[in-house]
Image (cartoon, coloured by chain):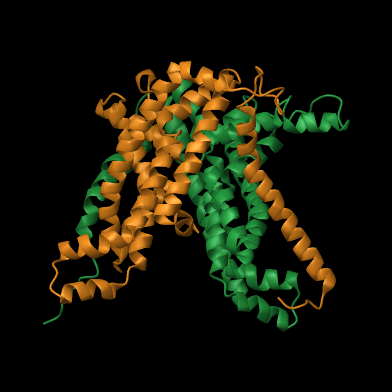
Amino acid sequence: MSRSPFPLDRLSFEGLLHLLAALALVLLLAPTVIVLVVSFTDGLSLRFPPPGYSLRWYGELMEAWQLHYALKNSLTVAVLATALAIGLGVLAALAVARSPRLSARLLDSLFLSPLILPALAFGLSSLMFFSLLGWPVSVATLVVGHTVVCVPYVVRNTVAALTQLQPALLEGSASLGASRLYTFRRITLPLIRPGILSGGFLAFMASFDNIPVSLFLRDAATDMLPIRMWQDLEGRLDVTIAALSGILIVATIGGIAVMERLTGLSRRLV
Amino acid sequence: MALPDVTTYPLRLASPLALFFGAFFAAPLVALLALSLRGAEGGFGLSQYAAFLSDGFSLGVLLGTLWLGLKVTAACLVLGLPLALVATRAGGWVRGLIILAVLTPLLTSVVIRTFAWIVILGRQGVINSLLSSLGLIGTPLRMLYAEGGLVAALAQVQMPLMVLPLMTALSRIDPSLWDASEALGAGRWRTFFRVTLPLCLPGLIAGAVLTFAAAISGFITQSLIGGGQMLFMPGYIYQQAIALQNWPFAAAMSVIFLVAVLAVVLAFNALGRLARGYAQT
């Protein structure tokens, strides 16, 4: 940009802008860094900086069978809910994406509404609903509840990918004699696959991390990892949780990196 | 003969998800509504709502929760907009780095991020050890279980929801508009308020709605950082439903909470339309 004719104006604006941006960046990054550092402490408390460094809490993690059990449940529910969300969500996205009809727009808003609604109220209403039906809480009820809150991610990302699709490609394929199913398999699907994948990834993370729905739909037999961690933290500040957090943070960053390579995740979210 | 339309798909492909939502999203909400209309001594009526709305404590919790949401949204906006603007103008690797810094917390468990704030705000935490080693304080400050700490933690947890829509909106602004504004004699501040801000309003409103909705229903952060002293709607609903098993009252509270959230979201959207009208004058 050219030299500004108002030095004070420029200085105050740029100064404040970069100061606030730096503050935001520190605020975003500091917690992650601090948890990672604290997880290597050799002490018994969450003091920062730690008195010394060791892998003892990662060793303790191997023995924490309650966390292992909750992790297994969380993974099972997340995988099933993501599969269901992709199956239902992609079909729905195909139907509403390019349609100008009012009913399609309304359905689109309905499918995205769990993103805005307080999930805790939905969790409570699901518990009431299932108990009215006489269904005991189980992995099945958890999967159903999680699917509702995960579907919006799949729908939103698939619709976005479909909107960018060139209609001429589909018309060209049809005019060359391809059936609709063949066109879908050979043209549409490969082009929207990155959108489906990134939506599925976000849905998986949303389910794995979900608390407000699990809070009401799980019991002792279906303990979920985020809830187990929360209850451990409410009881006492456990350094094992820091080690577990360290592993989950590294796994998340790994997942983001893989998704970035496969789908350009960041371009889809910005 | 008209060519068959091959670029759209029939609406009936949406029916499996529509049925699923009808059965497991709409029906539970109807059940919630029905249960909230059950009176304390059987029968149907609005007595649960009357009980909530005539109780000063309950109303205080509701207003406190909405106020907390507004404070967190404001904090996210003041910090998130500069970050999004810097990232968009910089481009290249700076932009990539900022996106990674925004995405990582978004996808990290809320429990972990809240846990980090316990480490930061606690009596032996980062801030207290820093201040006491500098000799600025004698006894540790109380930041955990205090509202300032809660707003900071919620702002960090929800900031990605503000920054991402803002970056989308800002990246759609033609950079030559900034040059044009400057060439016509406007300074940086004037350019910001007359060009940048009006043009990124859709992203700002979208971000504000998501941040607000997430902040007021952030049960885990509220309960771990706020502690027992501060009660907000999600914790209050949980307490009534699980600890006290008072389902009709919890249902009425949930309906009131839902309506309040919806009202604030609609107000945000109306504000956005109003502001767009102003920007065009």
| Residue B34 higher or lower than A221, as above or below | below
Residue B25 picture quarter = top left
User: Which residue appears at 42% of the width and 49% of the height?
Assistant: A259
Count of picture labels: 0
Q: Which of the two residues, B65 or A97, is positioned nearer the viewer here?
A: A97
Q: Which of the two residues, B52 or B238, is positioned nearer the viewer here?
A: B238
**In the displayed image of the protein, which residue is found farthest to the right?**
B135
Percent coordinates x, y for residue B114 in the rendering: 59, 34
Chain B colour? Answer: green
Q: Which of the two residues, A105 or A256, is positioned nearer the viewer here?
A: A256
Residue A56 appearing in the image: yes
| Residue B146 higher or lower than B4, as above or below | above
Residue B161 as seen in the image, left or right of residue A54: left
Percent coordinates x, y for residue A194 in the rendering: 36, 56
User: Which residue appears at 36% of the width and 25% of the height?
Assistant: B42
Percent coordinates x, y for residue A153 in the rendering: 39, 50
User: Which residue appears at 60% of the width and 54% of the height?
Assistant: B98
Q: Which chain is orange?
A: A
**In the displayed image of the protein, which residue is found farthest to the left?**
B1
Residue B52 appearing in the image: no
Residue B155 as seen in the image, left or right of residue B111: right
Q: Which of the two residues, B159 or A103, is positioned nearer the viewer here?
A: B159
Looking at the rendered image, the quarter that the N terminus of chain A falls into is bottom right
Percent coordinates x, y for residue A123 in the rendering: 40, 34
